[in-house]
């Protein structure tokens, strides 16, 4: 009798579960495929990889397998597809500028390399979406062909020179800088921070210097960088890479400055970091609304084991940064530092006064292992320091000829 009772209980539970399964099928979120306004144009071998690995979540051509369609699976699938389309939608490729398209492709490749995309729970059931090493080689070769050439463009030189002249002549407080839509305020004192690294982004033709506030510098010197302590702030300043007649690549026109500020309680919903970006001379906030932070989070997600920070700090000096340079013929990158007297003169465009001290630190370049499309400092090749009126005239003349990078 006990055995029959147990069987009846199992049967009732099974019937109840089946009834619940049938019932939840009536609660299915809509997931349609809106019209394609402009699809990605790429070589067939490239496009086939992206279609296979990305299009189900990042296009309006989602193809559901039979096991994706029943609830509750469809609930999870719908959420992932909607989030994926908001971050990147290949079906609206024509809505992006050429530079934005390149940026999205390089970001996508780096997400793939770090196995953040496609999602592991997706590839578990959709094995054909897995990206092989051979696929990655094809994507790398294609993206390398999209990198902008570094040319001594007279128009780019003129734009940089005009911006520099305007910056040097500026007086007063500068533009009224509005906060980002998420409430993150512009950190106007970043130009007085210390440089902690630099990057050549050949994928988009820019040069960058990463600067840290006193809290960041203190954390670096104490070895407390994973996680970074509250109060840490970074400024990533970007300029257009400009090929000068000397053959050196120098910072050209100022493009933007990005900030990260650590406060694990205030910014608990965004990885413990506040994010902001301001573009151009007028320092216009990047975000159209507060949701722009999802782009920042998505881009930095591969660094989740490093507190979402890409930058590997190099030597942090007490002097402030004046400018930087890249010598591709030698495979090196350099940063010019100065004491307070020298920096003040450089940023006013005036002759260096007595007691000015300049230091040029040169590193060998290496490929950034965390971002395909970038080069970063490796080992130090040399450190040269010159003082006003004391050291060899040729080196003093060279260093003083490197004008300050624009930092609005």
Image: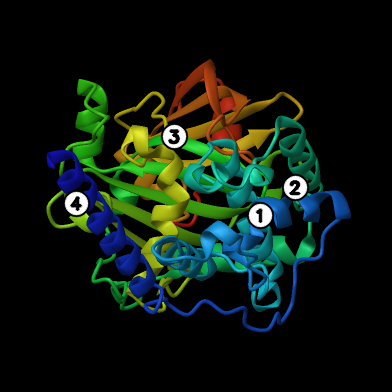
Label 4 neighbour load within 10 Å: few <14, some 14-19, many 20+ = few
- Quarter assignment of residue 169: bottom left
Q: Are marks 2 and 1 in contact (CB under 8 Å)?
A: yes
Give the numbered dot on residue 197: 3
Q: Nearer the viewer, mark 2 or mark 3?
A: 2
| Count of numbered tags | 4
User: Do the residues bearing badges 4 and 3 touch, measured as CB atoms within 8 Å?
Assistant: no
Q: Which residue is mark 1?
A: 105
Which residue of the protein is positioned furthest toward the front in this rendering?
1
Q: Quadrant of residue 258?
A: bottom left
User: At x 61% / y 47%, what residue is drawn?
Assistant: 126
Q: Decide which of tag 3 and tag 1 comes sooner along the chain.
A: 1
Q: Quadrant of the C terminus?
A: bottom left
Q: Which residue is mark 4?
A: 9
Which of labels 1 and 4 is toward the front? 4
Question: Closer to the N terminus: mark 2 or mark 3?
Answer: 2
Residue 29 in percent (x, y) is at 42, 77
């Amino acid at each position: 009798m006990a055995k029959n009772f147990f069987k009846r209980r199992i049967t009732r539970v099974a019937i109840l579960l089946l009834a619940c399964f049938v019932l939840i099928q009536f609660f299915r979120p809509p997931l349609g495929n809106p019209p394609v306004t402009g699809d990605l144009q790429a070589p067939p071998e490239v496009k086939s990889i992206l279609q296979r690995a990305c299009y189900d979540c990042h296009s309006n051509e989602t193809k559901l397998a039979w096991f994706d369609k029943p609830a509750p699976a469809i609930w999870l699938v719908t959420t992932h597809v909607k989030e994926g389309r908001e971050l990147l939608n290949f079906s609206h490729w024509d809505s992006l500028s050429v530079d934005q398209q390149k940026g999205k492709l390089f970001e996508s490749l780096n997400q793939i390399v770090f196995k953040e995309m496609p999602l592991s729970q997706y590839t578990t059931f959709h094995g054909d979406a897995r990206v092989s090493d051979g696929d990655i080689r094809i994507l790398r070769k294609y993206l390398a062909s999209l990198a902008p050439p570094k040319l001594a463009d007279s128009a780019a030189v003129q734009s940089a020179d005009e911006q520099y002249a305007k910056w040097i002549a500026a007086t007063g407080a500068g533009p009224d800088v509005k906060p980002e839509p998420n409430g993150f305020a512009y950190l106007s004192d970043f130009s007085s921070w210390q440089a902690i690294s630099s990057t050549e982004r050949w994928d988009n033709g820019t040069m960058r210097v990463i600067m840290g506030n006193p809290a960041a510098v203190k954390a670096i010197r104490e070895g407390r960088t994973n996680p970074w302590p509250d109060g840490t702030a970074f400024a990533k300043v970007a300029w257009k890479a400009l090929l000068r007649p000397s053959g050196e690549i120098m910072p050209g026109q100022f493009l933007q400055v990005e900030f990260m500020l650590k406060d694990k309680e205030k910014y608990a919903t965004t990885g413990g970091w506040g994010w902001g970006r301001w573009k151009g001379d007028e320092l216009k906030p990047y975000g159209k609304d507060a949701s722009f932070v999802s782009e920042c989070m998505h881009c930095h997600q591969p660094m989740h084991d490093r507190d979402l920070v890409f930058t590997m700090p190099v030597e942090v000096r007490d002097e402030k940064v004046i400018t930087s340079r890249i010598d591709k013929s030698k495979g090196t990158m350099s940063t010019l530092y100065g004491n307070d007297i020298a920096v003040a003169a450089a940023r006013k465009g005036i002759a260096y006064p007595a007691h000015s001290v300049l230091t040029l630190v040169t590193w060998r370049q290496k490929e950034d292992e965390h971002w395909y499309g970038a080069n970063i400092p490796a080992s130090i090749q040399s450190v040269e320091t010159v003082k006003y009126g004391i050291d060899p005239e040729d080196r003093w003349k060279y260093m003083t000829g490197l004008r300050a990078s624009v930092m609005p």
